[in-house]
Image (spheres, rainbow, N blue to C red):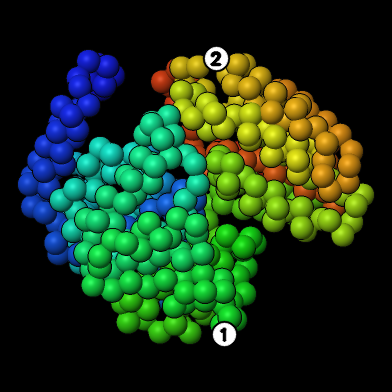
Amino acid sequence: MKEFLKKFLPNFVLSFYHFILAFLGALIYGFPSKKLILIGVTGTNGKTTTTEMIASIFEKAGKKIALLNSIRFKIGEKEEINKLRMTMPGRFFIQRFLKKAVKEGCKFAILEVTSEGIKQHRHRFLDFKIAVFTNLAPEHIEAHGSFEKYRGAKGKFFKATKEIHVINVEDKNSDYFLKFPAKRKITYGLKTGDINLENTKLKLKIPGEFNLYNALAAISVAISQGIDKDFAIKVLEEFKGVPGRMEEVISKPFKVIVDYAFTPNALEKVYQTLTSNIEHQTSNKLICVLGSCGGGRDKWKRPVLGELAAKYCDEVIVTNEDPYDEDPRQIIEQVAKGAENISINQSNQHKSAVHKILDRREAIREALKLAKEGDIVVITGKGSEPSIVIKGKKIPWDDRKVVKEEFQNLKIPF
């Protein structure tokens, strides 16, 4: 039915259809967001980690919260894994979720807000009090038609949120988001903004400069709700991370990291963080397993992902991810072509070896076999996602579980 509507209905009719669904969802469940302080986090990268950080601060401060993100659905003490493979679920799901949150006595609800969700009016009739902008990089270009339209979708969310805007002022697109009116605006950045690290010490347990930005966003939201800054910092310094986000699955004799990164911007930041950890020991290698963002989406970035892998990694293994209805072999070839074109590793001027392995388990096994003591293996693209989607069928999967199984099977001595 969905594909039929997409194929045959004009865009304005399809947009109206989504708008009506949004209204009906809110009407049926009694507009529950009006009884909550609704916090929405949008941006290309960092949404999930930021929502988790906000939730952690608020819960430690004694606030009862609801959380809806790409990993889990949580209301108070009750939670379940997000198996929908949707970061921002449909309108009826969200409204029903928020009604449950109100019934359970939650005061705050924290949601990821996606450009596709905004395009389909899933943010409509949700009374957002706080809009958070993390960062913006080219993504979902084919779905929106251009980067400007992609950014414009995010802008609609800020335009609709009138109370508080929290903005990463060090992102080059910040001026665009700052132009939208709000009763209060809080900016953040490492060196600039209302909340920054120039006069603040913040030492996270999780790696990556990008996580410092996520933390500053969360601290800004906490301050907007009267939570003490020092308290928020203390909570985040004990924050242990998010499943499938820079998650260290194996520690010895080499490290294995699983991360969700599937955009060029996110992938490069992961690689930069990991190479900085091993650059002082030139004999150690970075071994990278990657696929693409999945079939049918943003084909432009496939060779770009491959180029980035070849730029930073000593061994590149291109494998299957979520091909959907596409031929996974073709996706692998497109990613590998980018890697093969940029086969000179800039840090040590030697050619990166590029491997193409269709079976993702076999690819992970090969990466573990290649690793020596002190090396880092990083597996990107899926994070903690519980399935691989092939021709509409969800096949149970977990990169972290597979890593542990294959590591055990290889009987690698500690």
For marks 1 and 2 on the same chain, the one whose residue lies earlier in the sequence: 1
Q: In the rendered image of this protein, does residue 147 appear above or below residue 168?
A: above
What's the residue type where badge 1 is placed?
A: Asn
Q: Percent position (x, y) of residue 137?
A: 50, 47
Q: Percent position (x, y) of residue 374?
A: 85, 52
Q: Residue at x 29, y 65 (%)?
A: 130
Disc 2: CA contacts within 10 A as few (<14), some (14-19) or many (>=20): few
Residue labelled with disc 2 = 327
Tell me the quarter of the picture where residue 15 sits.
top left
Disc 1: CA contacts within 10 A as few (<14), some (14-19) or many (>=20): few
Tell me the quarter of the picture where residue 367 sits.
top right
Q: In the rendered image of this protein, does residue 225 appear above or below residue 2?
A: below
Foreground tag (1 vs 2): 1
Residue labelled with disc 1 = 199
Q: Percent position (x, y) of residue 288?
A: 72, 39
Secondary structure at badge 2 equals loop
Q: Residue at x 7, y 47 (%)?
A: 27
Q: Residue at x 75, y 27 (%)?
A: 341
Considering depth in this image, is 171 or 370 the residue closer to the camera?
171
Total count of labels: 2
Secondary structure at badge 1 equals loop
Q: Percent position (x, y) of residue 2?
A: 25, 22
